[in-house]
Structures are given as C-alpha cells and as structure tokens.
Amino acid sequence: TEEEQKAFDRDRRLSADSLKVETLADSVRYDSGHIYFTIPESEEPWSIFIQGRLLLEDGSGMSVHYLEEESEKAEWVPRMTYSFEVADAAYEELWMNIGYGNADYASELTRLLPEGASPLAAAPLPEGKADIPEGAEMIWPVDSTQINNSFGDRAKPGGEGVVTHTGVDIGGMEKGTPVYAAGKGTVKEAGFNAQDGNFIRIDHGRGQETFYAHCEKLLVKTGDAVTLGQTIATVGSTGQSTGPHLHFELLVNGVATDPEAMLKSGQDTAKTAKETEIERYYESGSLPLFQIAFSNLDDDCALVRQYAEKTYEDNSVAYFSILTQHMSEKTLEEWLNKALEDEKWNFQSILFSALDQDDEFDELEEKREKEWAEAQTAEYRAAGVTMDGKNYYYQGALVNIFLDTRPNKSFYTLNMNPAGTVNIKIIRDSNNEITGVAYLTEAEIAELLN
C-alpha cells in the first residue's frame, strides 16, 4: 500500500543516515593531545557540536567548545579530516553531538582521553557587586547596559511566523566578566545544555525567578543560597552562542517579563532605590516588576498611599489592584467610599473583592444596571424612540439598524432587526446628552457592516 511504501522509504532513509552517522563516530580517534575525525561521503549538511566541561581544583567545572566556527557554519566537507587539541587537564565530560538527515548520535569522547590528568587550577573568585543601592530588591546582573537583542516577539527571518525572545541578550563584555545574582534567593538549577550552554536559574520567592545563560563558568551549584549582587558566574559564549554575552530572563509566576525595566530603575540614583524602582516600573508599564517592588513593604506605608492616589487619578486599575494587597481594612473601606462617590465602577469591583464583599457588589451592579436601563429607556422615549423587548421603534416604524455611539467612542449600542424598515442613529453632544435622531446614510450603513 501507499502507506507501507512511505514507511519503507522512511525507514530506508533513516537506516542510510544512521549508517553515515555511525561511520563518522567510528572515525574518531585520539593521538598526541589531539582528537581527529573524518566526514564520510555525503550529500546533505552535517550538524556537529563538540563541547565538554573541564574539572577545576575547587570542584566546579568550566565549559569548553571546539571547532565552533565550523559548527556555526555547518559546512563540513566530505572526506576531510578535522582535528582539535584537547586540554592537558581532567575532563568532567566531553561529547560530540552528530546529526545527519533523520539520524542523530551523541558520542562520548572522554573514553578516548588518557587517564591520570589533573584538574585545572581554579582562578580566584571575583568579588560581588560593590555599588548596590541601599534598599534595592533587584539589580541588573552585569556591569553593561548594551542590549544586543531585546525582549518580545519579532518576525522570523523571511517574514513567516513570529519568534518570541523571552529575555534580553546583554553584550559589550569580554569573557570572564562577573555575572551577579539579580536578587537574593536559592539556586533552583545550575547546569549545561546544548541550547543555553552553562546556565543558572534562581528562585527569589513570591513567584519570581531569574535565568542566566551562555555563561563561561558557574560559581554556584543547585541548592546554594545566594545574596543580592553575589557573583554567581562569568560571561561566556557557551551553547548556541555567536559571541560573549549574557542571556538574562525575569519570570513572574512562570511568565517571562521584560527585564529592561530593572535596567532603567538602576540608572537613576538621585532618589532612594525603592522610590526609583517603583517610579521606573510604573512609567515603563512593567506591572510584574511593580508588584515585586511592593512585595516587602508594610501595609499603608507612604509609598502605598502615594501610588494609590496616583493610580486612582490615572485610572490605572491593574496597578491600583496590586496596591489593595498592601492596604488595611480601614484604608480599603475609605477608598471604597470614594469610588462609590465618584461612580468608578471598575475600582468598586476591585475594592469590594479586596474586602471579601463580592455579593454586595453583585447586588449593587444589578441595581445599577436596572436603573441605567430605565434611564436609557426614558431618554430614548424623549427623542422619539421606543422599545418593546429587543425591538426599537422610531415614530412608529420598526427599526432595522439602531446605533447609539457615545462621544468618546468608549461605548456604543448596536441593534439589528432584519424585519425593520428604517435605519437610525442617536445624536449626542460632548456632554453625552441626546440632541436628536438621524437616518443612517447608505455610506454609513456600508461602513458599519464592513
């Protein structure tokens, strides 16, 4: 059958690809401090990455990569023999990852190396960051502000689809530059993979994590407690990297967040560190970092009161919602009374919920909707429009299209009844008062329906 033929062809291709991969792996040999291998006769491109970790005297490891330029270009020449010099030191691991067609293979190379090599002498650990602003909760992880690749979505090469960069790539540094812990916490994971190279993930509590990738050397291990500004690694170019840089991520409750707001907060030292953090996070629109900044503050403190006033006046409901978590019951009740007086329904909803009074809000909302509907019906009637259920009538004629748009276009009413014979729109002034009714033109109808 056609299905059996496809399966047969697929297995045959896989078998042929696997044979070539095995042929390359069998060609690997060690001689006089070098490892050699030969590319078999082939038609398709090869994927070959050679990487490992050297043991250091202090028990840590340092990543090494070989033939990086050839790996990046993926232009391995058939029948050519390649070689690289290995270090005169003990290896924790050394691997050659081979891919060809539909086959791949990981070949361990440490078995080829002579025994008895000693670990490398460990370089002195760099000191932690010295100039941490007083009261800072989080800091920028390196002494460079050069962003080579920013956070967010961007089109894939060729314009088909979107790729998401979940952090920022920080450049402008040499290998060995210190990487600092952006905040105090616990090392959740420290290790190596082909994509990220040497990486560290730190859990800061309250749902916050930071991630550091492509490091040259890791100075902490899984389970270690770290302090704010502690040197945890050095900048490198391990994993899938084209040059020395740090890939840095900030996650809040598992969601990647733009870390550049942290950078902006650290560039202004005229105010207190905490005040600067909060101001920068609010102005840059970084809701998760704004939440982090308030996480350790006392209820009803000066900054909570200051930004409660600001977010209320700015109608920034989401930011105000965060602040309600740091208000006493008395303060919440005061804000609720103000929101009721100002008829700010969205703030009322947040405050009723913060006070565990959702039932009272539901009753108030139901009453308000009923009063609004009655007032709206009376307003329409005064303009010559009557309602019968969902049907609108204008001067006794059933309405086909009914449109009522508020002046700021933030709310509109649109009703359509195919049995109607007239199409009308409500005319309102800048104060939202009805000034008349007009028939919709054919152009307006076409625009509306499109």
Image (tube, helix red, strand yellow):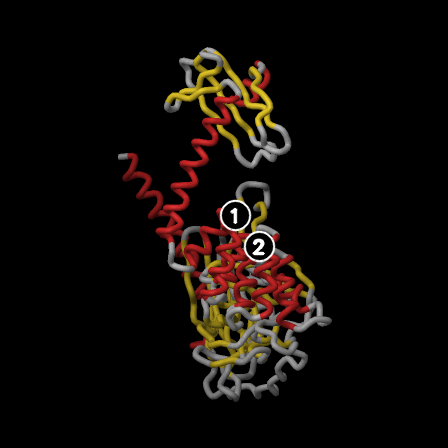
> Residue 229 vs residue 30: left or right?
right
Element assignment for label 1: loop
Q: Residue at x 38, y 41 (%)?
A: 366
Amino acid type shown at disc 1: Lys
Whether 262 is drawn above or below 447: the answer is below
**C-beta proximity under 8 Å, tags 2 and 1:** yes
Residue 242 is at least partly visible in this image: no
The residue most toward the right is 270
Mark 2 — residue?
Answer: 312
The percent position of residue 129, horizontal first and vertical second, equals: 64, 80
Asked whether 251 or 447 is in front, the reply is 447
Amino acid type shown at disc 2: Tyr
Element assignment for label 2: helix
Disc 2 from disc 1: Cα separation: 10 Å
Q: Residue at x 60, y 59 (%)?
A: 309
Residue 441 is at least partly visible in this image: yes
The percent position of residue 183, horizontal first and vertical second, equals: 55, 74
Q: How many marks?
A: 2
Q: Earlier in the sequence, mark 2 or mark 1?
A: 2
Residue 344 disc label = 1
Whether 402 is drawn above or below 8: the answer is above
Asked whether 152 or 73 is in front, the reply is 152
Asked whether 96 or 217 is in front, the reply is 217
